[in-house]
Image (cartoon, rainbow, N blue to C red):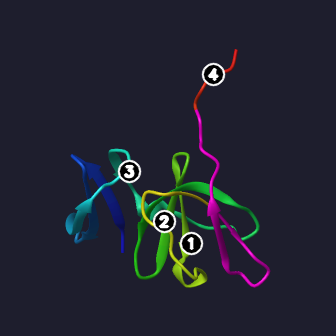
Amino acid sequence: MKQRLLIMNGQRIVQIEQGGTWKNEKVDKAGTLKPGIYNLYMAKEADKGQKHDGTIVHTDNGSVYQKIGTNFVMHDRKNFDKVPDVGTLKSIGYDAQGKAVVAEAAKLSRGRSR
């Protein structure tokens, strides 16, 4: 099932594709997420051998979706003791048992140095 998010006008719209058209599944507040179209169906499975730093954009019954740069990573929800909140900046790694280890991510900056 293809899934995407639309963030606009302060709303977070979860859509699924059915028969070639997108249908709204859920609408709620966007919070701190930046406006845009988030194609969650293009998310890659998280590599358990590395840390992933980025914003949590969506969670559902099976997955936690994280935006890293312009790409999306999908974490298996069953690996989390507590699922991070949507809109939070997190660093997600994995321990030896394959459980997700969630920490605050360093603030990403676009500043210039002279």
Question: Which of the two discs, 1 and 4, labels the residue nearer the N terminus?
Answer: 1
On screen, residue 31 above or below 60: above
- Image quadrant in which you'd find residue 94: bottom right
Label 1 – label 4 distance at C-alpha: 32 Å
* 5 lies left or right of 107: left
Q: Secondary structure at mark 2?
A: strand
**Which residue, given by chain and number where applicable, does mark 4 sit on?**
112
Task: Look at mark 1 in the image and give the residue it sits on.
Answer: 75
The residue under label 3 is 33
Query: Tag 1's secondary structure?
Result: strand
Q: Which is more N-terminal, label 2 or label 3?
A: 3
Q: Amino acid at mark 3?
A: Leu
Q: Position of residue 37 (x, y in %)?
A: 34, 50
Question: Would you place residue 30 above or below residue 82 in this image?
Answer: above
Locate residue 2 relative to residue 20 in the image: left or right.
right
Residue at left 29%, top 54%? 6
Give the residue furthest to the front. 104
Please give the residue where the numbered disc 2 appears in the rendered image. Answer: 65
Q: Is residue 13 left or right of residue 36?
A: left
Q: CA distance from mark 2 to mark 4?
A: 30 Å
Q: Is residue 7 magenta?
A: no
Residue 97 included in the magenta stretch of the image: yes
- How many marks on residues? 4
**Mark 3 vs mark 2, CA separation in Å:** 13 Å
Q: Is residue 45 left or right of residue 47?
A: left
Check disc 2 and give the amino acid type: Tyr
Outermost top residue: 114
